[in-house]
Amino acid sequence: MRKMSLWILAGVLLLSAALYTNYLYAESARPIQLPQQQESRPEAVPTFSSEKITYGSYGQDVYELQSRLKYLGFYYGQVDSTFGSKTVDSVKWFQSEFGITPDGVVGAKTKLKLYNATKDWKPTETPLHKQGQGGTTETGQAGQAGNEDDGSMASANSMGLSENELKMMANAVYGEARGEPFEGMVAVAAVILNRVKSPSFPNTPTGVIFQPGAFTAVADGQIWLTPNDTARQAVQQALNGWDPSGGCIYYFNPKTATSKWIWSRPQVKTIGQHIFCM
């Protein structure tokens, strides 16, 4: 009887062991459920447009360019969204260090190198081209609040003007209005654009500028003087939509004007030494 009890106990133990072994095997075969983690998405930051960024450009592309260069220690000026001489020097410095021909022009190759070198960059500077905080630009001019649209010169140039047209506009502004308030220089650039849009004038800036008798700077040769940063910036502002003249197509200096006809035009406003009229 005792022997039979031992056999029964042994059978129970063997059966229990077999069941436990099967349980452990089943548990080990079950796929491990890892806790789900929320997908981490990096904060979006601006990226360059497809347009080249060149001397005289203005807007978001230049803001990003200066900020990324400053992040790397290649730019020490104010991030003012204006591509002036300081930015040119910084771009050339960066290009020479990264094996790119140092021409100061920010094309696709330079953008890619700069982007890859500053993937951790985040915007921290105040974007003056959007908010106009009254700071000074590389040209020394005060920021104009609320008068610029977002974007670089190329993206703002909705009229499709060539580089040569833009250069001639800067030449004309410099020849006609250097020494005038910045607002007055922008107004001169705006008058040129207003004439381009008017059916009464040639439909290109060059045609407007070189129309016989139209501009004193053409007559006296000052059109060929090299424009400064301020003149280029004035053209930028006009391209971006700022028209301090209020839509005028004429202006004159009352101290030097010799035409009696110009006095017959409806006068809109005076900026600096110039009267702007329709």
Image (tube, helix red, strand yellow):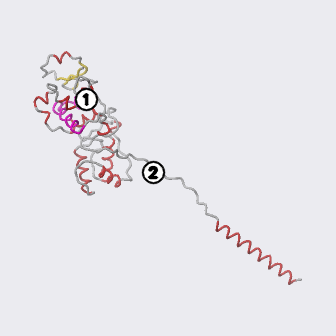
Q: Which residues are magenta?
A: 162-189
- The residues tagged by marks 2 and 1 sit, at their Cα atoms, a distance apart of 43 Å
Image location of residue 184, percent across then percent down: 22, 29
| The stretch drawn in magenta includes residue 3 | no
Seen from the viewer's position, the closer of residues 69 and 149 is 149
Amino acid beneath label 2: Pro
Name the quadrant containing residue 16: bottom right
Image location of residue 20, percent across then percent down: 72, 72
Name the quadrant containing residue 233: top left
Seen from the viewer's position, the closer of residues 156 and 208 is 208
Image location of residue 50, percent across then percent down: 33, 45
Name the quadrant containing residue 247: top left
Amino acid beneath label 1: Leu
Residue position marked by numbered label 2 in the rendering: 42
Q: What's the residue at 37%, 47% (across, down)?
A: 47
Seen from the viewer's position, the closer of residues 38 and 112 is 112
- Classify residue 31 as left or right of residue 148: right
Q: How many marks?
A: 2
Element type at marker 1?
helix
- Disc 2 residue crowd, few under 14, some 14–19, many 20+, Cα 10 Å: few
Residue position marked by numbered label 1 in the rendering: 193
Q: Point out which mark residue 223 bears.
A: none
